[in-house]
Image (cartoon, rainbow, N blue to C red):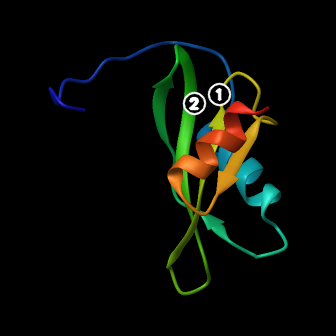
Amino acid sequence: MVTKESNIYQMSGATEMAAQSSAEGKVQQFGYRASFPMIINLDGQPTYFMTLKDSIGLIKQYAFVSVVNFSTVGTGESMSTALRDYEDK
């Protein structure tokens, strides 16, 4: 992101829509909707990052979802809390 250069990596795993569904499922009691995820390299592991918004579009939580295993989801009210939750899985 710093150099604004893009790289294409071919890998198998969860789609963006599956990652969004996993994140929304973790907070289904709140009815939050996931934004379109961005894929990041988190400690050498491909990971989706997205925001979770309420019905009027305010960011309420953040989510990290593993590309390899989309049932591994971390959420929290801050990015650091969501990351901790994700790393504890």
Q: Quadrant of the N terminus?
A: top left
Dot 1 and dot 2 residues touching (CB under 8 Å): yes
Q: Name the residue under label 2.
A: 47
Name the kind of residue labelled 2 in the image.
Thr
Secondary element at image label 1 = loop
Q: Name the residue under label 1.
A: 67
- Residue 10 lies, in percent from the top left, at 50, 12
Mark 1 packing: few (<14 Cα in 10 Å), some, or many (20+)? many
| Residue 9 shown left or right of residue 71 in the figure | left
| Residue displayed at 70% across by 21% down | 68
Residue 56 drawn above or below residue 50: below
**Residue 42 seen from this side:** yes
Secondary element at image label 2 = strand
Name the kind of residue labelled 1 in the image.
Val
| Residue displayed at 75% across by 75% down | 31
**Residue 18 seen from this side:** no
| Residue displayed at 52% across by 18% down | 43
| Residue 4 shown left or right of residue 71 in the figure | left
Residues under labels 1 and 2: Cα distance?
Answer: 5 Å
Q: In the orientation shown, which residue stands out farthest toward the left? A: 3
- Residue 35 lies, in percent from the top left, at 53, 59
